[in-house]
Every structure is written in structure tokens, then in C-alpha cells.
Amino acid sequence: MLAATETPKREIQNTPAGQRLANSSSNDDKEINIQVVVRCRGLSEKEKKDKTPRVITVPMITGKDVIYKSGSVNRTYTFDKVFGPDADQETVYQEVAMPILK
């Protein structure tokens, strides 16, 4: 039983980045790779004005991790590629969409 102040927790099944999934739109045994790419935004002007703490950091060492820090919670999430707040739309398009379209 949960206390009135507790939030119910939901289990999330992890799917490894790049896991192969069957292509259900065709009758043959083709497989496709799924890439998970994240673009983290910076703080908005309102968030800066309100002195909202930054809870997401993107270490550029690997370009694949996002670190979430809030209070005592410290988690690292790994993706196929991560873009920080300085990445513009053109950069994301060139690095993610263009290789797929070629």
C-alpha cells in the first residue's frame, strides 16, 4: 500500500540500443536497426529567470550519454547518439537524417 505522498512506480522494460526488430511490413525475413537519438535542450529564458536548476548534462566524451541529476538522484542513460543544447537543427539533420537518406 502506498502512503498518500508516494508516487506509484511503473516498471519500464529496457530495450538495448540497436536491437534488431523484424520488419512487419514485408513477407520476407528482413530486419531493421532502430537508432535512438536524443537532443537535449538548454534552459528557456523563463527557466533561467526563475533560476531553475539544470538537471540534464551531456558529457561530450562519448556523445552517447545523458546524465540526470536532481537532489540525491543521479542516473546515466545511454543512447546511440546524444546532442547537447548547443546542437542546432542543421547539425542534427546532417548527422542523423542524411545518412539514412543516402
Image: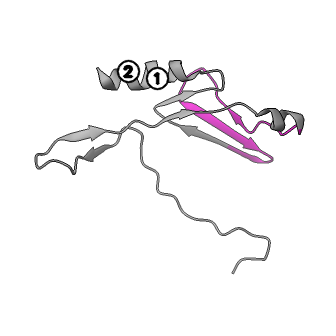
Q: Is residue 58 magenta?
A: yes
Residue 5 position in % (x across, y down): 80, 71
In which quadrant of the rendered image does the C terminus lie?
Answer: top left
State how the image is colored: one colour
Q: Which residue is more in the foreground, 75 or 84?
A: 84
Residue at 62 percent across and 26 percent down: it is: 84
Q: Would residue 64 appear left or right of 60 to someone viewing this image?
A: left
Residue 24 position in % (x across, y down): 22, 51
Q: Is residue 53 magenta?
A: yes
Which of the 4 quarters of the picture holds residue 4?
A: bottom right
Label 1 to label 2: alpha-carbon separation: 6 Å
Residue 23 position in % (x across, y down): 22, 46
Q: Would residue 96 appear left or right of 25 to someone viewing this image?
A: right
Q: Main secondary structure of the magenta part?
A: loop
| Secondary element at tag 1 | helix
11 shown above or below 36: below
- Amino acid on which disc 2 is placed: Met
Q: Would residue 90 appear left or right of 33 to someone viewing this image?
A: right
Give the extent of the magenta segment.
50-74
In which quadrant of the rendered image does the N terminus lie?
Answer: bottom right
The reply to whether dot 1 and dot 2 touch (C-beta < 8 Å) is yes
Could you classify mark 1 by the number of other residues whose Cα lies within 10 Å: few (under 14), some (14-19), or many (20 or more)?
A: few
Q: Which mark is residue 84?
A: none
Q: Which residue is mark 2?
A: 98
Residue at 54 percent across and 34 percent down: it is: 38
Q: Which residue is mark 1?
A: 93
